Amino acid sequence: MTNLQGRTAELASNLAAVEERITAACEAAGRKRDDVTLIVVTKTYPASDVRILSGLGVRHVAENRDQDAAPKAAECSDLPLTWHFVGQLQTNKVRSVASYADLVQSVDRAKLVTALSKEAVRAERELGCLIQVALDAGADGRGERGGIGPGGVEELAARVAEAPGLRLDGLMTVAPLTGEYAGRQQAAFERLMDLSTHLRVAHPAANMVSAGMSSDLEQAVAAGATHVRVGTAVLGVRPRLG
Ligand SMILES: *Cc1c(COP(=O)(O)O)cnc(C)c1O
């Protein structure tokens, strides 16, 4: 067996296990499997893995660092993939990200909205945007790992909705490690769902709810997430922090 065959078999087996988990979680929640989209987080893994995953039927991939993502997306530009950017994003990287990302899930401040809008228009692309909600936001309304506190969602969402080149698609969160939701993933994801319900009153099309990773996708599906972002469970434990 070649390395490529070995890696393909490994990813196929991991993917099947994740698929089974999502299916079971949907059944337990009385939801249709089609209501939940798997996004495979390929950060720190090579373009060759992205290519294998595409061959295995994966259609959504996510990256969190522009330095890694830009060359990978370029190498994989022939594949029928939707690219999600899920990392903390500095405005000096926005031009690059806007050239390959289809969605940015980590929109968390007005300055970023302005920059994304400018570069999306420049690139003549429409960028889907999710507001990243920090459920552990401090008094300053910001999360330690990015995100805006629940109180800031409405105003930021309105900015995205009005910005040329941007499309408001919904909300994203990462289960907090600290604060009142620490260790209570499902409660955190239910809070995100409440915020989504509220958001959709003014923005009915912004119906994406991105929550849940390798360790807590079941809780996210139970809470009503439409998108889960799974890295480790598909690709393996990352070789370095990402
Ligand atoms: C890395 C990452 C994931 C995937 O995490 P795993 O635990 O590897 O499944 C999901 N969302 C974001 C924002 C990430 O940075």
Image: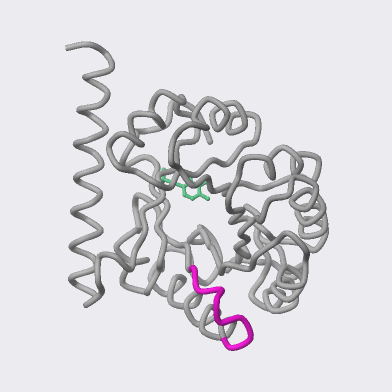
Q: Residue 106 placed where, x, y %?
A: 63, 55
Q: Which of the 4 image quadrants contains residue 179?
A: bottom right
Answer left or right for 94 relative to 217: right
Q: Which part of the image, by quadrant, shows the N terminus?
A: top left
Q: Which of the 4 image quadrants contains residue 139?
A: bottom right
Magenta extent: 201-208
Q: How is the image coloured?
A: one colour
Answer left or right for 37 relative to 156: left
The residue drawn where x is 77% and y is 60% is: 113
Q: Residue 137 placed where, x, y %?
A: 65, 66
The residue sitting at the bottom extreme is 201
Q: Between residues 184 and 118, which one lies in front from this camera angle? A: 118
Q: Is residue 205 magenta?
A: yes
Answer left or right for 5 relative to 180: left
**In the picture shown, does residue 45 fall above or below 93?**
above
Q: Between residues 169 and 210, which one lies in front from this camera angle? A: 169
The residue drawn where x is 63% and y is 65% is: 131
Q: Is residue 182 magenta?
A: no
Q: Between residues 175 and 20, which one lies in front from this camera angle? A: 20
**In the picture shown, does residue 110 fall above or below 18?**
below
Magenta-drawn stretch, dominant element (helix, strand or loop): loop
The residue sitting at the top extreme is 2
The residue drawn where x is 44% and y is 25% is: 239
**In the picture shown, does residue 178 fall above or below 203?**
above
Q: Residue 42 placed where, x, y %?
A: 45, 36
**In the picture shown, does residue 72 fall above or below 224?**
above
Q: Residue 205 placed where, x, y %?
A: 55, 76
Q: Which of the 4 image quadrants contains residue 4?
A: top left
Q: Between residues 231 and 3, which one lies in front from this camera angle? A: 3
The residue drawn where x is 61% and y is 81% is: 203
